[in-house]
Amino acid sequence: MNNDSPAKAILVVLGTAFVCSLLVTIAAVKLKPIQRAYQDLERNRFIVGISGLANPGQKLEDSDVVDLFRELDPMLVDIDTGKVDGSMNPLTFDQRGAVGDPDLGVAIPSELDGASLSRRSRYATVFVVGDRSNPQRIILPMHGQGMWSTVYGYLALEDDLNTIADVTFYEQGETAGIGDKILDSGWQARWKGRKLYGADGVLAFRIGDGVIDDASPAARHEVDAIAGATVTTNAVTALVQYWFGPHGFGPYLENMRAGEAGS
């Protein structure tokens, strides 16, 4: 074929495009396990950070995260029944992927969907610090629609299953410098010691309307608002109230208190 022919030029372009696409595909397949491992490590870093196993302010190396994460006891919870489910591996269960699965996901009734999720997984992986029957802390996942993104986090409860031990948000796409202040460690520290439920058992936690005076009655259940981030902080209130309400982890926590969650 003539080197100057248009047909040969087209063949060369197509061949080059095919080889490049093949190399990209191979690289993506080879790198996917590495990327997943890195993502899991970073997620585990956030979980360990609110577990109480690390010293406050301790800088955790990757090896520290791996070692401390192994001390946690993961359990797969059937959110609908509030019971521990042993049919699947809690460490490999894909809660996000399960949402769209007709067997693993459920629709959220509109009157309960304050977090604007539409659907959720039937199962969730929770982490226990200490003995399952008498945990020091329980770490539970939560997520909900923010202003611009889905906000993902974990909330750790003390052994009374009501007092917030710590909180972390590890994935979000909220407004830079405003809504993303939910990542601020100082603001998250304000959650510690707040109660999810009132003396009557009703879910009472919320982000307040301003700075909360620690000496006020409101401080029992409320955390400071973030200036200019009303939509995001309202969304945080909504996602906490959903996940710790009757269609979220409410039944599981009730079963835990009664010693009926299973193991």
Image (spheres, helix red, strand yellow):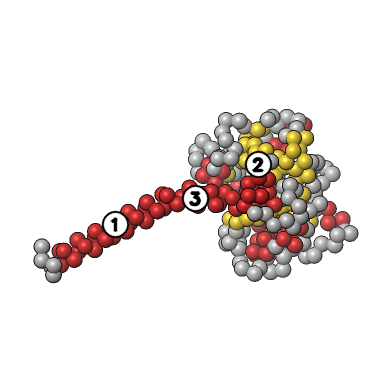
Q: Residue at x 68, y 30 (%)?
A: 263
**Residue at 69% across, 57% down:** 59
* Front in this rendered view, residue 43 or 62: 62
Mark earlier in primary sequence (3, 1):
1
Q: Amino acid at mark 2?
A: Arg
Amino acid at the residue labelled 3:
Ile
- Give the number of the disc on residue 70: 2
The quarter of the picture where residue 91 lies is top right
In this view, the residue in front, 111 or 125, is 125
Q: In this rendering, does residue 96 appear at all?
A: yes
Question: Viewer-proximal residue, 72 or 67?
Answer: 67
Is label 3 in contact with label 1 (beta carbons under 8 Å)?
Answer: no
Q: Earlier in the sequence, mark 1 or mark 2?
A: 1
Write down the residue under mark 3.
34
Query: CA separation, marks 1 and 2?
Result: 43 Å
Residue at position x 46%, y 50% in the image: 32
Mark 1 lies on a secondary structure that is: helix
Residue 203 visible somewhere in the drawing: no
- Measure the C-alpha gap from mark 2 to mark 3: 20 Å
Instruction: Identify residue for label 1.
Output: 19
What residue sits 73% from the left and 34% below the top?
132
